[in-house]
Amino acid sequence: MSNKWKIITELLLVVCLVLMTTVVGCQGSDGKTDKPSSAEDQPQEIDTSDFVEIVWYHLGDPPTNDQLDLAAEEWNKILKEKVNASLTIKFIEWADYLTKYNLLLSSGEVFDMINTASDWLDMWPNAAKGAFKDITDLLPVYAPVTWSEVPQEHWDQCKFNGKIITIPEDQYTQWINHGFFYRGDWAKEFGITEPIRDWDTLGEYLQKCKDIKEVIPYDVAGSKASELLDYWMASYTDSVCLEIPGNLFYSESYDDLYTVYSPLMEPVLLEMAKKMKEWGDAGYWRTDVLNYTGDTREALKAGQTGLDGHHTQTYSGLRVEMDEKQSGSELQMFPVHLQGGKNLIEMSITHGAQSVAASSENPERALMVYDLMRNDETLYRLLNYGREGVNYIIKDGKRVRPEGFDETEHSFFSNFWGGRMDKHEIPTDRTYDKIGELYTEYDKVKKPYPYAGFVFDRTPVESELSALNDVKMRHIPPLAFGKAGDPEAAVQKFQKELKTAGYDKVLDEIQRQINEWKESKQK
């Protein structure tokens, strides 16, 4: 008996020592649990004996040539060797993209990874519905490079209910603030010699486009109504839009970030409705604009319209295209936030992110592939730029088009984001070489993103939020394009329907959660 108890006692001591070593090894010097610093802290043997196909969904229209497929052949050779997997990219097209995106996530379709964003792709609502896998414990093991390079405070911004559900694009520099693109050569011809920085001057430009150039000044599609509304609010309020689906609710200003309201319930909306009716009556867009689905950018490139709109990153490349297709056009940008200059906000790190789908059958391998595509320079270039020598060459430190390059045949497009890295980027001659002048303007007024860590729980007002968005989608297109009849009557009807749909209840709930978040930050 004594020998038996002696053996048991020794075994218990061994177990205790192992447990103590494990606890100590997982704690920092202050006793708090730290994340592992590298893959060396993780099990070294990962079973990749079974070959798997990893499917990613990207946002964007699919390419019309075979260059992505040819690049995929190259990266899949490397992935086969490294992790015994292949990567296939599928696309969610831009037309009605949000509806398609949310339907895909709720469909149960089996795929592995998908772009997401907290400010424009319903990341938090989809996380609440269980659309994304919890990757907290998987990241250190299967994406060790990404895990170690993303700071802990950034991982904290990627958590839903305490679990990491996405990977941030936090090491890539870009400006995604929006504005209008207009022809600088035409503006000068019209006597507008200073950069356009307000809507009144923009209206003068559009009138001259109609009178002198005899084109539809802004040949815009009806689907851009909400964008036009956002532009107006960026210019005529100091407000900061909250990351709540529908873009209905804002803070009063950067100096008052915790008071919630909606400019759609304020006189600023009537001011917009009146101005847009003036513009519509003046013929600045098609009479059937609400039903028009054409491509404004292609019309701009063809010299058939004088205005387009999107963000600064788009402008930096479009300027080069316009210099080629409309020589001397000197495309300019009116960044709408610069009219007031008090609400130009730096980008959230979850504006572009990458999540593992809840339906993924191979989340471990998906993260291994992602880790390579984000951090392996060869794979990064294949995914972002295509094949060197065919889709690009490097000359004097810049990506340029090879001799014999044909845009239709050789252009490359993957629309990869959610993992771009400044350290792997190669400058391109396809970016406007004076874009820095615009960045200098931004630097004078920019403000840090203020809502990192705030996740709105829409559960208490789910039905009311849905009803509010339905009301908005019915009323804003005719209001934004001056097709709603008398502006005052139309705005009053819209605001009344918002009230009926539950505006006050939603406002109170958002304010309550903002107050709680503010208090939690002060503890």
Image (tube, rainbow, N blue to C red):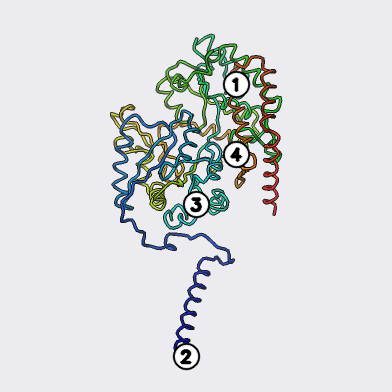
Q: Amino acid at mark 3?
A: Asp
Residue 266: x and y in percent read 71, 27
Q: CA distance from mark 2 to mark 3?
A: 49 Å
Between the C-alphas of marks 4 and 3, the distance is: 21 Å
To which residue does mark 4 refer?
243
Q: Residue furthest front?
A: 1
Q: Amino acid at mark 4?
A: Glu
Secondary structure at numbered mark 3: loop
For marks 4 and 3, give the one nearer the viewer.
3
- Which badge, 2 or 1, comes first in the chain's sequence? 2
13 lies above or below 151: below
Q: CA distance from mark 2 to mark 1?
A: 89 Å
Reading the chain from its start, which is encountered first: label 3 or label 1?
3
Q: Is residue 289 left or right of residue 278?
A: left
Could you tell me which secondary element the residue under label 4 belongs to?
loop
Label 4 or label 2, whichever comes before in sequence order? 2
| Marks 1 and 4 close (CB-CB < 8 Å) | no
Identify residue for label 1: 480
Q: Which residue is mark 3?
A: 134
Horizontal placement of 47 versus 168: left or right? Answer: left
Amino acid type of the residue that numbered disc 2 sits on in the rendered structure? Ser
Left or right of 193? Residue 360 is left
Between 157 and 355, which is closer to the camera in this rendering? 355
